[in-house]
Amino acid sequence: MNLAPLPSTSSEPLYVRLKIALRDLIGSGLQAGDKLPSEAELCRKYAISRITVRQALGALENEGVIERRQGKGSFVSVPKLQEPISYFGSFTEEISAHGKRSSSKLVSLEVIEADLRVAQQLRLESGIKVLKVRRVRCADSQPICYQVTYVPHALLPHITRGALRRESLYTHLERSLGETLHEAEEIVEALLADPYRAELLQIKKGSPLLLIERRVFTRSGTAVEFNRSFYNAQMLRLTLRSRRATFGEHSRLVFRAHDEKVAVND
């Protein structure tokens, strides 16, 4: 394995330069699952300390580029799923588009009274019955997303666990509505995994998550779904295409208050 020299710039810390060299190595043709040189080999090659090597490997691991296995070494990670933020479809459609096999574990299916937050999102009166579906979504059997979905119960009054396994929720909704789902409004934010979500996604407590909140509308403008999807951030990247805002347009950046809490009982 040919290791490139470290970038010559002196404006960046040594571990960052090593990280860049390793990223170049991975980009030169290594595949997911290929093993990187050991810490000792990197120390010898670049005449640097083990602490520096571990800083570089740790940074690559945090970025999802590699994974480190206790007692075995560092390996190239499976590339992150890449989702265009302007597109929405069922989870099955999105995962299939990447050539992966999707599957779901149904955590719960229940009918509840909409609290104020859910009612506002679905443009309902508080207390109206909604269907609440909690699922762990997987790509090639690996958990990638914990999803909590709310739908007006009147739209799917007889939905069953078996029906959700056979067809996507969006298929059931479109059949019930007699029209297609047309548009989605999404909000993305970062947070850390609490113990409950970490256990469901088989990751460590405190691991980074991407929370995508989505409201789905029909062509006629009816809000028919509100869902909160907690993605393992090391397995997903979002792509955006933007245009420069003209004077007077609203900013899309919203800064949360430090003391605002994210519901953990979803």
Image: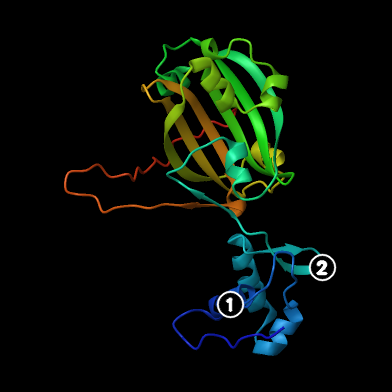
Q: Residue furthest right?
A: 71
Q: Is residue 161 left or right of residue 92?
A: right
What whole-number distance in Å separates the C-alpha atoms at marks 2 and 1? 22 Å
Q: Residue furthest left?
A: 247
Is residue 114 visible in the rendered image? The answer is no
Is residue 112 visible in the rendered image? The answer is yes
On the image, the x and y values in percent for residue 199 come to: 71, 40
Front one among 70 and 243: 243
Residue drawn at (63%, 44%), measured in percent from left and top?
Answer: 96
Report the number of discs: 2
The secondary element bearing badge 2 is classed as: loop
Residue under label 2, please give it. 72
Front one among 87 and 118: 87
10 Å neighbourhood of mark 2: few (<14), some, or many (≥20)?
A: few
Residue drawn at (46%, 25%), measured in percent from left and top?
Answer: 180
Q: Earlier in the sequence, mark 2 or mark 1?
A: 1
Q: Amino acid at mark 1?
A: Asp
On the image, the x and y values in percent for residue 152 come to: 51, 15
Q: Quadrant of the C terminus?
A: top right
- Which numbered dot is residue 24? 1
Position of 131 relative to 47 (above/below): above
10 Å neighbourhood of mark 1: few (<14), some, or many (≥20)?
A: some
On the image, the x and y values in percent for residue 254 come to: 35, 42
Residue drawn at (57%, 14%), measured in percent from left and top?
Answer: 156
Residue drawn at (57%, 17%), measured in percent from left and top?
Answer: 131
The secondary element bearing badge 1 is classed as: helix
On the image, the x and y values in percent for residue 34 come to: 74, 69
Q: How is the image coloured?
A: rainbow
